[in-house]
Image (cartoon, helix red, strand yellow):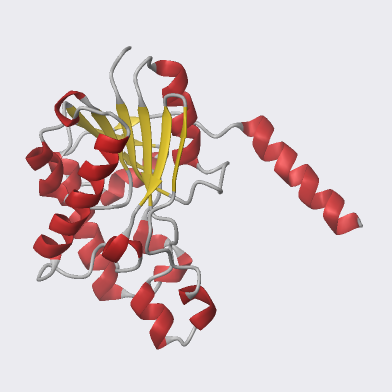
Amino acid sequence: MDADLVIIGGTEWSAENQIPQQMARAALRLTSGNVLYFYRDLQTNFLRAIAARKYSELRKLRWKAFSISDGRLHVISLSGLNAFLPLALSSMTSKSRSWIFRRNLVSAMRQADIDITAAIAIVYWWHFPVLWRQLGMKKVIFDIIDNHAALGMNMGRTRHNRFTNKLVSETASQADAVTILSPALVGVLPKDCSATLMPSPIDVTLAKSFLSDSSDHRQV
């Protein structure tokens, strides 16, 4: 395959054994085109960090985007307001957030020398359902690897989870294809959405090496 691939919404690049990072490396082997990994450098919610007085978290925020290029691989983080504002505040702010996010994404794709209309996007947990169609990407794959409403940090956040699930449903209906890693994730999708169950791309050997290293440190 010679198409450019854009991995959108992964965890910070340093978390090398996470699924989105594994997907980026697999993409490099799959295509002869460019691969862009576009992510949020810090997963902390800026407003919640202030409310909880976790000021040490705020010092980690970057105003300027982190960017590295290694041959066909381009790794670029969100910048400016997108670096610290929640990506899904509410339906009232979705238009302005989508506009800001779009500027960052288009700029990153230009930096990676990727033609938007010829690119294939694999999107994760940034839910801007209408945006993918507006950008005119060749194909959009929505890869669902977690049920966010079931994560420990979101337990009891009824309003937040309801809104997130709504965005997941809308994104699934806008994507060209939906992939899941567990049959249980079918429950987060709209009833008329068909998803393809995929094997996990996690590098088991790499995961075992991390576990081994952790065990050695504990013994020391």
Regarding residue 142, the answer to whether it shows in the image is: no
Is 203 drawn above or below residue 48 in the view shown?
above
Indicate the position of residue 161 as horizontal and vertical percent values.
28, 67
Regarding residue 205, the answer to whether it shows in the image is: yes
Is 120 drawn above or below residue 214 in the view shown?
above
- Name of the residue lying farthest toward the right: 220
Q: What residue sits 17% from the left and 70% below the top?
A: 90
Q: Is residue 95 left or right of residue 29?
A: left
Quadrant for residue 122, please give it: top left
> Of residues 12 and 217, which is closer to you in this image?
12
> Of residues 161 and 70, which is closer to you in this image?
70
Can you say which quadrant of the picture contains the C terminus? bottom right
Q: Is residue 189 left or right of residue 129?
A: right
Q: What residue sits 50% from the left and 74% below the top?
A: 59
Q: Is residue 84 left or right of residue 133?
A: right
> Of residues 98 and 163, which is closer to you in this image?
98
Q: Is residue 95 left or right of residue 197?
A: left
Indicate the position of residue 26 as horizontal and vertical percent values.
47, 25
Quadrant for residue 16, please give it: top right
Q: What residue sits 24% from the left and 44% below the top?
A: 107
Indicate the position of residue 146 as horizontal and vertical percent values.
40, 50
> Of residues 83 and 189, which is closer to you in this image?
83
Indicate the position of residue 211 as horizontal and vertical percent values.
73, 45
Can you say which quadrant of the picture contains the N terminus? top left
Is 51 drawn above or below residue 67 in the view shown?
below
Q: What residue sits 42% from the left and 63% below the top?
A: 62
